[in-house]
Amino acid sequence: MREALSRVRVVLVEPQEPMNVGAVARAMRNFGLSRLYVVNPPPRVGPPWAKEAYWLAVHAEEILDRAVAVASLKEALADVQLVVATTGRPRELYPAPVVPAWEVPAHVLSVEGEVALVFGRETFGLTNEELSLAHVIGTIPTAPEQPSLNLAQAVVVFAYELFKAVEGEGRFPREELAQVAALEAFFDDLGRYVLEIGFTDQNRFPYAMRRLRRIFHKARLTPGEVQMLRGLLHQSRYQMRRKDG
């Protein structure tokens, strides 16, 4: 089961402090994770990664050396089958099922392909648009008197839960899920369709799409199912055009 950790990438979105990046690398090393992606890091962070990052990356310098800097979150998720976004902020409606940290490993270990654990900015986390890319949203219950964790602490909790599940050698049936790019193409099609048929309007569109994303993320769509759903939408459009003609 340890090989499952090699399929997991940790994605940091716009981290603002180089020492936090180094501390994340050390936390990853503690629990068997080795692949770090950094989205749109400011120049003071890197690349090349700041010396302050290496100060905190004790025995995890290699993770920093191999860390991949990308321009956007979508680029970091291009070939990923399962996206677990993390948040500590309550929202009116999440676009994906919400689970506590200890339930995340069951989702991660049940897929065959690449997995991303996505962590947001130190100041305000992930935006609603970034959360919309997630299949599952992980949270860490905390005391209400001090609900926020720093970036490395959050990574430690999720990495520990995943490592514990792997070391326990639990058996999770594997399935192949549709990659992020295929799902986003489907959601683009679906968004145009619900507007065309009058299911919603431009004002209510973001809310409607968050609810629809949540429904389809719960379904854990396979590549073939996404292809079938896109075909259904395209055929429906074709028939509507024929009737209008």
Image (cartoon, rainbow, N blue to C red):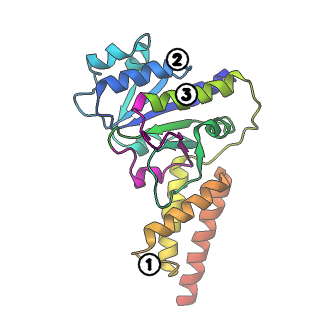
The residue that disc 2 covers is: 30
Dot 3 or dot 2, earlier in sequence: 2
Q: Tell me if label 3 and label 2 are in contact, CB under 8 Å.
A: yes
User: Alpha-carbon neighbours of circle 2 within 10 Å: few (<14), some, or many (≥20)?
Assistant: some
The residue that disc 1 covers is: 201
Q: Which residues are magenta?
A: 124-152
Q: Position of residue 230 (x, y in %)?
A: 59, 63
Q: Position of residue 187 (x, y in %)?
A: 52, 61
User: Alpha-carbon neighbours of circle 1 within 10 Å: few (<14), some, or many (≥20)?
Assistant: few
Q: Position of residue 60 (x, y in %)?
A: 43, 14
Q: Tell me if label 1 and label 2 are in contact, CB under 8 Å.
A: no
Lateral position of residue 228 relative to residue 179, left or right: right
Q: Main secondary structure of the magenta part?
A: loop
Q: CA distance from mark 3 to mark 1?
A: 41 Å
- The kind of residue tagged 2 is Asn
- The secondary element bearing badge 1 is classed as loop
- The secondary element bearing badge 2 is classed as helix
Where 64 falls versus 84 (above or below)? above
- Indicate which disc residue 159 carries: 3
Where 189 falls versus 175 (above or below)? below
